[in-house]
């Protein structure tokens, strides 16, 4: 059975009070629509049709890399009208999953259950039972069978007592969508073309309506304003935190843990409070992350410790390394095992070999460092001449004295030593000592200027 996914994303999102279209608002670091598209891709849909309206250009630009078929709904005349727009690109065989661009947390598993249930009947939806159902379309059942979906504004007082609601997630046969959608009318309390009217048509055709419930209620929560956005992000992250803890991750406080992406973590990983993890990160067994770290698209191998307030972006850290506190590893940083990077050290586009150390106040950019090197406090690789970047190559067992400037392009041979305070502009031979300093002058019995006595 081929699956098409239709994502409704034409709504304006007025209540966001934002220049950004609603489906571009970020939830856990990814636009709302992105979450839905990611899930649709996991279902191996044949096509992903997205109905856009407000802010269409911006939305399309933001997803230019995704395999989306865009269909415009110039005027928002209702959910039924929105899906009508998709008919021009929808095949007549197969089944469509109809999702909402502002319901970002629905999972692959819930949707697979919806598809499985709907394949038997030709039509199905996800419902949820709520304490306070006001505003939602209500599910009217008789002897357990769904009889109708009635919008809140069209419902009788009695129907408004019903707590089972329509979540707005559906799965429907494409042949039936082609039959039914052209027949929708807007003769209702909101003068909209309701997608939910196809359920009455299905019943009239003698079909049964399948229904499933989501695994977790927050999966079907929609986002209409920033209060709901923040609340939903917390729920998603709490759920992720719980999954990580069940896998053996020690989160010091799951309410102060922000995952904005995906984390693969080994056992006994320990993550302190207020850590932000973005993109795709991998932490090996026993990795420790101190408080306040920000770690993006990075790979940290087993046993390494990242101390407080360090920032890593596209960095690779080997086994048993020590980073921070207050270290910054920028894109292209590749650290071998047992490397130490200390406070106020910045590394960019550089490789550092086994057990080498740069422990204090240093900039290493476009640099290759071998094994067992000691980079003294305050060392700067001068990699930029104002127009071009140049590399610094430091072989094994080199000792760079404190406060040295290494002007690239530069090669420092194995076992060489650079004296403290040097500006090194020429290559250094293996095992040589290179230094560059003015001669020290000393005046004996020097008298410092005195403040005038009052
Ligand atoms: C709809 C359902 C209601 C259900 C609720 C769940 C109908 C008639 N009602 O309510 O039973 O309980 O969802 O949240 O379908 N959209 C478009 N174009 C339009 C109108 C809407 O793309 O012309 C999109 C919106 O951007 C949104 C989704 O469709 O992503 C749902 O629209 P919304 O207005 O929130 O749904 P309701 O009609 O209130
Ligand atoms: Ca809604």
Image: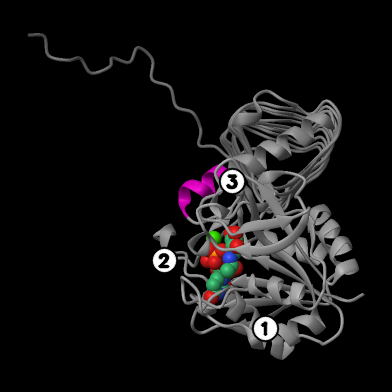
Query: Which residue is painted at 35% across and 12% down in the image?
Result: 445
Classified by dominant secondary structure, the portion drawn in magenta counts as: helix
Quarter holding ligand 2? bottom right
- The Cα–Cα distance between marks 3 and 2, rounded to whole angstroms, is 21 Å
Mark 3 or mark 2: which comes first in sequence? Answer: 2
Kindly identify which numbered label has been placed on residue 19.
Answer: 2
Report if the CB atoms under discs 3 and 2 are less than 8 Å apart. Answer: no
Q: Is residue 118 above or below residue 301?
A: below
Q: Which residue is mark 1?
A: 181
Q: How far across and down, in percent of the image, does residue 180 sit? A: 71, 83
Furthest residue in direction bottom, as rendered: 88
Query: Which residue is painted at 20% across and 14% down in the image?
Result: 450
Query: Was residue 271 drawn as part of the magenta stretch in this picture?
Result: no
Query: Was residue 226 drawn as part of the magenta stretch in this picture?
Result: yes
- The Cα–Cα distance between marks 3 and 1, rounded to whole angstroms, is 32 Å
Element marked by disc 1: helix
Q: How far across and down, in percent of the image, does residue 138 sit? A: 61, 57
Closer to the camera in the image, 99 or 388: 99
Query: Which residue is painted at 82% across and 74% down in the image?
Result: 206
Mark 3 or mark 1: which comes first in sequence? Answer: 1
- Which one is in front in this view, the residue at disc 1 or the one at disc 2? 1
- The Cα–Cα distance between marks 1 and 2, rounded to whole angstroms, is 32 Å
Q: Is residue 218 visible?
A: yes
The span picked out in magenta is 225-231
Closer to the camera in the image, 333 or 125: 125
Q: Quadrant of the N terminus?
A: bottom right
Element marked by disc 3: helix
Closer to the camera in the image, 22 or 400: 22
Q: Which residue is mark 3?
A: 232
Query: Which residue is painted at 59% across and 52% down in the image?
Result: 27
């Amino acid at each position: 059975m081929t699956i098409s996914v239709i994502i409704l994303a034409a709504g304006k999102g007025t209540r966001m009070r934002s220049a950004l279209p609603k489906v571009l608002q970020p939830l856990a670091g990814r636009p709302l629509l992105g979450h839905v598209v990611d899930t649709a891709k996991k279902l191996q849909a044949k096509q992903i049709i997205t109905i856009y309206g407000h802010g269409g250009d911006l939305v399309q630009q933001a997803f230019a890399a995704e395999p989306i078929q865009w269909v415009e709904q110039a005027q928002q005349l209702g959910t039924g009208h929105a899906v009508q727009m998709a008919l021009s690109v929808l095949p007549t065989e197969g089944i469509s999953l109809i999702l909402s661009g502002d319901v970002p947390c629905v999972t692959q598993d819930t949707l697979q259950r919806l598809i499985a249930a709907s394949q038997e009947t030709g039509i199905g939806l996800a419902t949820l039972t709520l304490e306070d159902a006001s505003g939602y379309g209500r599910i009217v059942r008789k002897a357990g069978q769904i009889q109708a979906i009635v919008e809140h504004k069209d419902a009788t007082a009695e129907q408004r007592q019903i707590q089972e609601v329509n979540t707005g997630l559906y799965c429907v046969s494409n042949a039936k969508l082609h039959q039914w959608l052209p027949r929708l009318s807007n003769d209702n309390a909101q003068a909209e073309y309701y997608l939910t009217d196809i359920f009455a048509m299905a019943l009239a055709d003698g079909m049964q309506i399948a229904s499933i419930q989501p695994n977790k209620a927050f999966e079907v929560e929609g986002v209409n304003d920033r209060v709901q956005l923040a609340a939903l992000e917390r729920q998603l992250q709490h759920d992720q935190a719980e999954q990580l803890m069940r896998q053996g991750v020690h989160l010091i406080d799951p309410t102060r843990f922000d995952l904005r992406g995906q984390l693969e973590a080994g056992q006994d990983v320990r993550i302190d409070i207020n850590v932000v993890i973005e993109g795709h990160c991998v932490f090996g067994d026993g990795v420790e992350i101190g408080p306040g770290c920000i770690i993006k698209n990075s790979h940290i191998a087993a046993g390494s410790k990242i101390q407080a307030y360090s920032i890593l972006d596209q960095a690779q850290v080997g086994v048993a390394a020590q980073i921070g506190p207050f270290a910054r590893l920028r894109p292209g940083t590749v650290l071998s095992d047992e490397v130490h990077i200390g406070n106020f050290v910045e590394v960019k586009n550089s490789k550092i070999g086994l057990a080498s150390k740069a422990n204090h106040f240093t900039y290493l950019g476009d640099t290759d460092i071998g094994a067992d090197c000691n980079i003294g406090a305050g060392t700067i690789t001068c990699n930029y001449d104002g127009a071009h970047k140049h590399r610094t190559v430091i072989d094994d067992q080199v000792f760079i004295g404190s406060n040295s400037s290494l002007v690239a392009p530069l090669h420092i041979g194995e076992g060489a030593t650079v004296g403290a305070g040097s500006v090194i502009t020429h290559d250094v031979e293996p095992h040589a000592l290179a230094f560059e300093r003015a001669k020290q002058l000393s005046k004996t019995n020097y008298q410092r200027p005195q403040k005038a006595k009052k």
